[in-house]
Image (cartoon, rainbow, N blue to C red):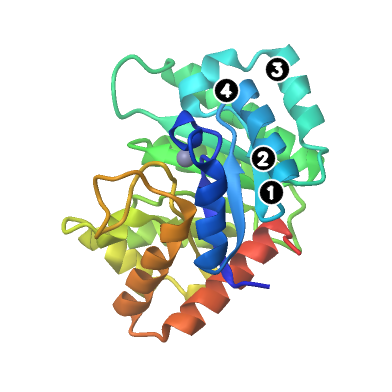
Amino acid sequence: MAALVDSHAHLDMFEFDADRDEVIARARVAGLGAVVTMGVDLASCRRAIQLAEQYDIVYAAVGFHPYAAAELDSKALSELEGLCAHPKVVAVGEIGLDFHREGLPPRPVQQQTLNRQLDLAASVGLPVAVHDREAHEETLESIRAWVQRSPGYEDRPRGVMHCFSGDVDLAREYVAMGFLVSIAGPITYPKSDQLRQVAREIELESLLIETDCPYLTPAPYRGKRNEPGHVGLVAAAVALERGTELVTVEETIGRNARRLFRLP
Ligand SMILES: [Zn+2]
């Protein structure tokens, strides 16, 4: 199986409506063996599962993004639980906290929705894909409490901190709790020294790579739409930072992704 895995994509978004087949064909050519596409609300979760049924290399994660945190009532939660039983659903995500601007659901609503979905993941035995944007302290607090109240996960990582934006110390805290840390396209941006340090200092066995496409396009394509086939640029940036052979980076990180998501 091809080594590369894009651990976080949004293939259901309208940006791919015109050429989704070609995007996935290019991902295969680029050596990807799997792409995990994230749901952000109920409709998007259903589309993610449809794509996973349609394309062999696509797997789905299901969850309510912090933007949609207010939509997770008890009916939605039980529907989400039903979706978790699908054989190609490999994680609960994208879930988390996002405090970067006004107009998002109130913090307590986001926190309650995150906590409910963390508990759902533990109850169905899936790992989590966590979004933390300008909410480092509060996200860490929720995850810590979840780790303490939820045993299990002895034989696999608990989840991934997607598009990691904290410092090395925060990354180490998550690794110590059984999380992987995912590096995205910003590693190629001039101002991302802190992220490059994370890519250098965290052991390769605890890293993942992702595109978060259609967003966060790595250089030299920054400014254009992102797609899973660009994840190799992130792998190359990690290899360059570490002074490690690209093939070692790709194989180790691919193994990490398969261990987390239990991919074939
Ligand atoms: Zn995302």
Q: Work out whether mark 1 precedes mark 4 in sequence or the reverse, and give the earlier one.
A: 1
Q: Pick the quarter of the image with the N terminus.
A: bottom right
Q: CA distance from mark 1 to mark 2?
A: 6 Å
Q: Nearer the viewer, mark 2 or mark 4?
A: 2
* Residue lying at 61% horizontally and 63% vertically, measured from the top left: 257
Residue closest to the eye, 243 or 3: 3
Check if mark 3's residue and mark 4's residue have beta carbons within 8 Å: no
Horizontal side of residue 25 vs 88, given as left or right: left
- Of circles 2 and 3, the one toward us is 2
Alpha-carbon distance for marks 2 and 4?
29 Å
Please tell me which of labels 3 and 4 falls first in the chain: 3
Please, what secondary structure does the residue beneath circle 2 have? helix
Q: Are marks 2 and 3 in contact (CB under 8 Å)?
A: no
Residue underneath mark 2? 51
- Mark 3 or mark 1: which comes first in sequence? 1
Which secondary structure, mark 1? loop
Residue at the extreme left: 190
Select label 3 or label 1 by which is in front.
1
* Amino acid type, mark 1: Tyr
Residue labelled with disc 4: 112
Q: How many marks?
A: 4
Q: Position of residue 232 (x, y in %)?
A: 43, 67
Assess disc 1: are there few (<14), some (14-19) or many (≥20) residues with their C-alpha within 10 Å of its C-alpha.
Answer: some
* Number of the label disc, if any, that sits on residue 76: 3
Q: Amino acid at mark 2?
A: Leu
Residue contact between numbered discs 1 and 2, judged by CB atoms under 8 Å = yes
